[in-house]
Image (tube, helix red, strand yellow):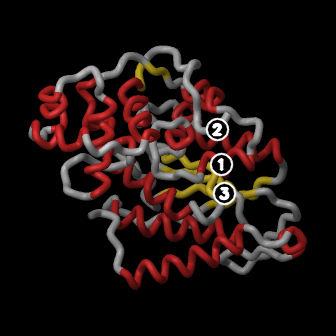
Amino acid sequence: MWGGRSAATDRVATDRVATDRAATNPPAATQLARARVDRDGVDTTIPGSLGQHVTMRLLSSQVLVATAAARRRAARILHEEGQARGLLAFRVADTHAHALLVSSRQVAFRFAQYAEQRMRRHLSLPSPFQRAHVVGVETQSHLERTFRYVLRQEEHHRAALDVRHEASSAPDLLGLRLIAPNLPERVHVALPRLTGRAIIEWLGLRFGEPDYARLADAAAAALALPQLDDRSSATAMARAAAVHAATDLTTMEIADRLTVTRRCIERLRHQPPPRALVEAVRRQLRLRATDATHLAFPFA
């Protein structure tokens, strides 16, 4: 599998994430008093800084993620590296990626370092990354503006490379994807006035009638899987969610769309996946051009 790690690597990753978790939430007095030093040894202390806005770009300034599979892999990497480092939002635009973290400057640089290493390896990027650009976020209003700016990169750059925002943290806040279960609560704590409907309006997303021709892709997208073409437990769960989401289709129609046998579909009908995942697949199927204001979201 593309993201596989050895046991030794997992132990190292666990140690560094535990260190970063402690650094992300130090005592308040320590946050205000300690000096923050960047990689060049320059004191960059900003008293009371709420978070960090990180920008990552290749030295060649090439496009980072050009396919749905690459966008989903990038999303998984950014979530995995950010979950213990205060990640609130990310968006991969065409030639660069933005992330917003509630963390120290050091932790933000470490997040960028590990995320860049993994993206270059798993996305087969042809160029090293530039040194990450990290800017402190000073006030609550600054945090709110930066969160909105990060998610609205398509509009800011007038690009339409990722109209479903798969290389973004938005799907995890809107019940479209289930790979970051703690993100909605983390965002709600940091931005209590934010609503799911506001994000829908920012991004211009609309939901219509289910497009069952995309059943396999919708199920893969709900778990950020490149495709449903292996025998992993995640693929099996995504297929089961597709079966339970496609209530308007016959067994043979579902089997045809998932390219599996009728017997496989009948077996999956008796293996109900989490309800939230079934709903995520349904929303992926409906991600089209009609109003979505009636939907409920993971946070109010």
Q: In x, y percent, where is residue 186?
A: 67, 52
Q: Are marks 3 and 2 in contact (CB under 8 Å)?
A: no
Q: Quadrant of the C terminus?
A: top right
Residue found at the far front of this picture: 270
Amino acid type, callout 1 = Glu
The residue that label 3 is drawn on is 101
The residue that label 1 is drawn on is 185
The one of 270 and 166 positioned closer to us in this rendering: 270
Q: In x, y percent, where is residue 94?
A: 45, 44
Disc 1 crowd rating (10 Å Cα; few below 14, some 14-19, many 20+) is some
The one of 152 and 215 positioned closer to us in this rendering: 215
Q: In x, y percent, where is residue 199?
A: 61, 32
Q: Is residue 133 left or right of residue 159?
A: right
The residue depicted at 23 percent of the width and 47 percent of the height is 228
Q: Is residue 70 above or below residue 159?
A: below
Mark number for residue 299?
Answer: 2
